[in-house]
Structures are given as structure tokens and as C-alpha cells.
Image (cartoon, rainbow, N blue to C red):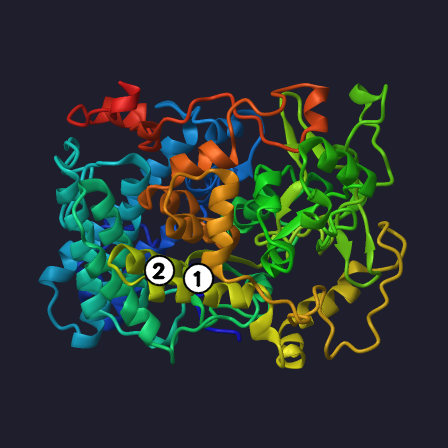
């Protein structure tokens, strides 16, 4: 389903500038400025809508931020790594160890980026208030979308830093260079709630003019409910009924929002803005392959794939996934194979580690030694793997343990079980949500990759709604939402739809046959398509008769096994979030607002288990945690640069 997107229009957005003629000797007698006055942005519906694109512009990665690719790297680091379900190396690893501080670049970059976007919204709303001559429909959508975008930026700031300065309509850091933080959490969240309430009232369910990527009523309601949950968490007061009511409106709108039958295909290139998507950015595949010209945006877009891709895939993998996350999936849960790729883990190693730890790891990792993976390029395979004895410093690796899956040859390529960098050892478990369509599926000079960046999809709302149900005494409805997602996760919603799903989603993979080129020149072997491409897909559709255990039954047992202190419902909601939403920009904030993150860190990542550094770590499939988790640090430090420029702003408690 190809849909028109607001982001595809940004390059052609109206630039409110005039030009003077230089065709005679009086060209210096300028009679007007080159920049038109702000009020000209509201002289017509066309101008107002074009000007609104300036508020959307900072939703895209910045062409001038290099590999930081604002806003993506700050968001990845603050919403994923602190959960420890994702792993990083080098200086990035500080975000997996609560090692950030007020000088951390990504925090400062994210802060500046968010407030730049807020200032644009404030300036736009200021002019809109005085605008005359606009149609009611355009004025409503302009105000609704600008307020929703402002609320979105504040949502990230508030969930990342705690209390922050709240600049309202008419304020920016030029006319308001100093401003203290909101005095209370109630004040701050009420500001954000008011923006999303207004946006929900002003906007329609369908995006304006059919341009997907614009804010909608559904987007505003999803964040409104989220904001009420955060207000409850921060103030200790109960606003869960208000949150539940916002989510219920979305769940009842079944003609607009419904689950994709297949979890796996949510991240495929063939469909953009499907009916599960509530708020996302789609980085479409463009015509600038091979270009590293930042002015064309291809560089900034391309970095997203590099964050998530395996080093054997031509990237450096600043986002690896933990073995604890991989091991959390139950047998039959297709979300694991639909979103994660592992290196080959030999059967003998499964036997060894299972005996040493007293775990039935072989059945839990049922196919790990022949990985359920996607597509990888072996040319950089030397960067992965367990070193051969005596060759640890020479990048010599066991060639019999592959990573990556070629759907054409049905063979595996790449190497290793661990990724070594100078100071860190990472598990070779990678999220394919953001790179299975990018580096490795194309040639080395390919830059621009299709990618789904989900900020909110229906699964987020279902789990948030489930939590609200449990908190408001409606446990039956809460378990029902979780079991619906588990039915989808086991492939039951795919049953009977295998041919239709393949017809919709396998075109991209079939087209790779031509793109990959001549067999044998890159190690992939013969690119022979399956005999029946009408029903073929790299991970077969359907449940194959597998069914999930009832959620309450399963999580009651898991709570006892792991020793979680949280109620069973809270374990269920948040463990499902880990399996469903990893590598999407909501996991850590959701664990925090639910009051679960400390329990999660304590029991899924017990302190001191395994080895911190050195070769001994290679024998323990565990993330070593040396730090004491401090919930106060989850309010990350206000950047030092902000404290210097804005002396009215003070620092968070844990960093004073």
C-alpha cells in the first residue's frame, strides 16, 4: 500500500523569500528584503500549509548532523539502551550503564533539536492566531498539527529529562533566552495534555489531504493517553481512567486501526503507513544510491541502517540486542525471528551452556545454531566472531559459524557469536526492524534505505490500554488485549492468508534477485528463487498449529521463576513490551511510567553475573552489569550547555 506522505513534500515546500533583479546598474537599490515578513505565511491556505512543513522538517534526520543524525541517535540512545535490552560499544555503551552525564553529546543534541522544533511550532502558532482569510478547515488542521507536533517534542523532553522549561506560543530562546523549568510535574504534564486534547479535537482520523505522515486525531489521542499515564506516575494521582478513555477511542475505530495480520511484515518495504501505524516516519527508498552528499539528505537517512545493522553487514552496529532479550521469547513466538538475527551458535555450545546454567537452553534457542535471520553481506565478516585460540589479536575467526540469511540460496553467510571492539564485547544479536531492507540487501554503495520508524502503532496502544484496565479494576479486558497480541505473535492471524500476504510483501525480496547481480561474486551463491514465488516469503507465514499459552498462566509462572516483585499483570504488560516494541522509540519510557524498570533490570540483568571484560566473557551468554541501578538517573541530566546559556534552569537531583 503506497501512500502519499507529507515528508515527500518537504523538499518542495514553499520558501518564503523574494528575489531582486540584477539586470541593470541600479541593482544595488534594493527596495525590499530578501526574506518576506512572517505574516505572508498566512496570506492564503497554500502559504499556511507550506509554512507548516517547517514544523515537520525536524521530524526527519538532519543533513548537517553527520552520523548523529538528529533526532534519531538521541532517541535511540535514550529510549532503548537504558533498558539494557539493547547493547552498544565504545562511548555509546554509557547509555547501557547509566553512564551519561551533563556533557554527553547526544543529550545536548537531542535537547537542542527538540527545542528548535518547539520554537518553530510556537512561531507558527503565533502567526496563525492573528491570521485572517484562511479557510476554517486549513486553520483547524494547521493549529491541530502544530500543537500535536509541539506536544510530541515536549513528550520526549519530559520523559527523558523530567521537568523542563515550557515555552508556550510566542516564546522561543531568542525572545525568552532564560526560563526556569516547570515548577511541578502537574504543571508540565497539564501543558502537554492540553496540546494533545486540543489537537484531538481539531484533527480528523484521516490525515489532511490524504498525506500520511501528518498528525491525526489518532496520533493525538495515543499521546494524550500516554501523557495521562505519565502524569499519574509522576504525581502519584490516578488519571488512568482518562488515559483509558483516550485509548478506547482508538481501539473502537476499527475501520482506521487494526492489527497487521503478520508482525514480521510491519517492517517490510512493500507497504508504508499500514493500518497499524498511528505515528511514524517512513524513510522511503530514493534515487540517490551511492551518494554521501549530506545536502541531499541521503547520508542522514542512511545512518539509521548503520546504527542497527551488523558489522558483517557493512555497518558497525551501535545497536546490538542482548542475549537476555533473545532468550525471553517463548518457543513459537514469531516476533523473535521476525525482528532479530543471531550469529550461528553451534549445537555443542548450546549443550555446554545449558548444562552449566541448568537451563533447557537448547529448546529455548531451538534454531539458534542455524539462525532465523535475514540478509547479510559477508565481506566484513572478519569483524564478527569468536577468535580462534591463539589468534585473538589478529582478527582470525572460526569460518564455520555463519550469520545472516540469503532467502534465494537458503544459505547462511557471515561468522561468529560475538562482536569485538577494542574495549567491549557485544553479542551478535541484531534488530532487523531497521536494516533488513537496507545495507546487505543492496550493493555496498547503496545509501538510501526504506525504513519504518514507529513511534506509535496499535500494539503500543493495546498494551497501554491493558495497563490502564488492570489499574482500574478491569483485569479481564487487560488480559484480552495481551492475548490478542500473543495470537498475532504466534502467526495465528496469518492462517488462511498466506497467499495474500506473500503477494503483498514478497515483491521486494524477489526484486533483490536482479539487484544482487551475478552469482558468486559476493559469497551469496546461486540466486535461485523458490519454485512458487506466489506463496514464498523468507519466514513462512502461518502458525503451523502452534498456539500461545494463556498470558496470565504463562506470566504467573515467569514471575515465580525470575523472582519479580511486581504484580503478575505488570510483568505481563512489560515483558510483552520487550518482545513487541524493542528497537522502537517507546520501550524504556514505557518501562519507567509503568514502575517496572527497576524490577526488570534487577531480575533480567542481575548485577555481577558473568564476566565484565576479557576472553572469559565469551563463555557466558549474559550481559555483565557492574552498576547499581538508580531510578533517579532515569531523569537524565539537563545538558551543561543549557545550564550555561539559561541560568534560570537548574539540574536534576542525581547530577547536582
Secondary structure, mark 1, is helix
x and y, in percent, of residue 491 in the image: 60, 68
x and y, in percent, of residue 504 in the image: 62, 76
Q: Which residue appears at 52% of the width and 25% of the height?
A: 625
Distance Cα–Cα, label 2 vs label 1: 7 Å
x and y, in percent, of residue 129 in the image: 11, 61
Q: Nearer the viewer, residue 558 or 516?
A: 558
Q: Which residue appears at 79% of the width and 34% of the height?
A: 382
Location of the C terminus (image quadrant): top left
Q: Is residue 546 left or right of residue 391?
A: left
| Cβ atoms under marks 2 and 1 closer than 8 Å | yes
Question: Can the viewer see residue 652 in this picture?
Answer: yes
Q: Nearer the viewer, residue 369 or 641?
A: 369
Q: Which residue appears at 67% of the width and 48% of the height?
A: 364
Q: Which residue has dot 1 on it?
A: 482
Q: Which mark is residue 466?
A: 2
Q: Nearer the viewer, residue 261 or 48?
A: 261
Q: Residue 391 is drawn in which quadrant? A: top right
N-term-proximal mark, 2 vs 1: 2
Q: Which mark is residue 310?
A: none
Amino acid at each position: 500500500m503506497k501512500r502519499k506522505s507529507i515528508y515527500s513534500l518537504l523538499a518542495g515546500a514553499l520558501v518564503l523569500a523574494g528575489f531582486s533583479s540584477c539586470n541593470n546598474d541600479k541593482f544595488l537599490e534594493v527596495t525590499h528584503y530578501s526574506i518576506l515578513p512572517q505574516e505572508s505565511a498566512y496570506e492564503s491556505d497554500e502559504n499556511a500549509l507550506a509554512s507548516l512543513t517547517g514544523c515537520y522538517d525536524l521530524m526527519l534526520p538532519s543533513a548537517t548532523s553527520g552520523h548523529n543524525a538528529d533526532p534519531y541517535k538521541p532517541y535511540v540512545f535514550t529510549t532503548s539502551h537504558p533498558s539494557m535490552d539493547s547493547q552498544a560499544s565504545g562511548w555509546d555503551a554509557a547509555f547501557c550503564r547509566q553512564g551519561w552525564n551533563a556533557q554527553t553529546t547526544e543529550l545536548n543534541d537531542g535537547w537542542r533539536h527538540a527545542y528548535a522544533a518547539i520554537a518553530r511550532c510556537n512561531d507558527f502558532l503565533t502567526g496563525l492566531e492573528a491570521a485572517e482569510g484562511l479557510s476554517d478547515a486549513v486553520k483547524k488542521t494547521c493549529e491541530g498539527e502544530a500543537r500535536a507536533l509541539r506536544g510530541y517534542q515536549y513528550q520526549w523532553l519530559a520523559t527523558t529529562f523530567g521537568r523542563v522549561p515550557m515555552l508556550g506560543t510566542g516564546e522561543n530562546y531568542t525572545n525568552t533566552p532564560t526560563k526556569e523549568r516547570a515548577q511541578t510535574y502537574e504543571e508540565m504534564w497539564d501543558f502537554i495534555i492540553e496540546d494533545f486534547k486540543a489537537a484531538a479535537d481539531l484533527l480528523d482520523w484521516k490525515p489532511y489531504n490524504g498525506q500520511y505522515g501528518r498528525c491525526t486525531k489518532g496520533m493525538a489521542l495515543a499521546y494524550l493517553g500516554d501523557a495521562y499515564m505519565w502524569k499519574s506516575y509522576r504525581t502519584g494521582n490516578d488519571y488512568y481512567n482518562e488515559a483509558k478513555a483516550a485509548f478506547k477511542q482508538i481501539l473502537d475505530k476499527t475501520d482506521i486501526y487494526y492489527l497487521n495480520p503478520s508482525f514480521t511484515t510491519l517492517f517490510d518495504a512493500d507497504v508504508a503507513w499500514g493500518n497499524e501505524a498511528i505515528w511514524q516516519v517512513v524513510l522511503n527508498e530514493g534515487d540517490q544510491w551511492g551518494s554521501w552528499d549530506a545536502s541531499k539528505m541521503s547520508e542522514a537517512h542512511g545512518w539509521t541502517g548503520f546504527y542497527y545493522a551488523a558489522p558483517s553487514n557493512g555497518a558497525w552496529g551501535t545497536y546490538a540486542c542482548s542475549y537476555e532479550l533473545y532468550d525471553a521469547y517463548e518457543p513459537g513466538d514469531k516476533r523473535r525471528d521476525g525482528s532479530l538475527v543471531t550469529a550461528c551458535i553451534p549445537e555443542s555450545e548450546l549443550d555446554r551452556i545449558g548444562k552449566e546454567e541448568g537451563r533447557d537452553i537448547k529448546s529455548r534457542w531451538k534454531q539458534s545454531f542455524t539462525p532465523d535471520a535475514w540478509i547479510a553481506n559477508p565481506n566484513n565478516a572478519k569483524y564478527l566472531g569468536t577468535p580462534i585460540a591463539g589468534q585473538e589479536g589478529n582478527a582470525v575467526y572460526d569460518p564455520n559459524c555463519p550469520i545472516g540469511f540469503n532467502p534465494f540460496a537458503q544459505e547462511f553467510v557471515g561468522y561468529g557469536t560475538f562482536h569485538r571492539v577494542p574495549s567491549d564485547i557485544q553479542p551478535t544479536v541484531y534488530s532487523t526492524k531497521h536494516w533488513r531492507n537496507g545495507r546487505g540487501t543492496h550493493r555496498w554503495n547503496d545509501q538510501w534505505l526504506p525504513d519504518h520508524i514507529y513511534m506509535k502503532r496499535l500494539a503500543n496502544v493495546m498494551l497501554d490500554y491493558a495497563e490502564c484496565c488492570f489499574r482500574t479494576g478491569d483485569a479481564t479486558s487487560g488480559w484480552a488485549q495481551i492475548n490478542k497480541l500473543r495470537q498475532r505473535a504466534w502467526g495465528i492471524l496469518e492462517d488462511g492468508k498466506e497467499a495474500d500476504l506473500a503477494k503483498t510483501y514478497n515483491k521486494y525480496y524477489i526484486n533483490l534477485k536482479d539487484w544482487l547481480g551475478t552469482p558468486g561474486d559476493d559469497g551469496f551463491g546461486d540466486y535461485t528463487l523458490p519454485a512458487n514465488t506466489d506463496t514464498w516469503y523468507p519466514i513462512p507465514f502461518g502458525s503451523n498449529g502452534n498456539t500461545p499459552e494463556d498470558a496470565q498462566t504463562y506470566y504467573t509462572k515467569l514471575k515465580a521463576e525470575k523472582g519479580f516483585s511486581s504484580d503478575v499483570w505488570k510483568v505481563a504488560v512489560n515483558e510483552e513490551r520487550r518482545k513487541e516494541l524493542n528497537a522502537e522509540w517507546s520501550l524504556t519510557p514505557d518501562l519507567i511510567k509503568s514502575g517496572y524498570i527497576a524490577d526488570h533490570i534487577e531480575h533480567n540483568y542481575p548485577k555481577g553475573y558473568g564476566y565484565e571484560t576479557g576472553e572469559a566473557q565469551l563463555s557466558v551468554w549474559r550481559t555483565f552489569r557492574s552498576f547499581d541501578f538508580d531510578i533517579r538517573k532515569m531523569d537524565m541530566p539537563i545538558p551543561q550547555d543549557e545550564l550555561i546559556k539559561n541560568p534560570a534552569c537548574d539540574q536534576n537531583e542525581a547530577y547536582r
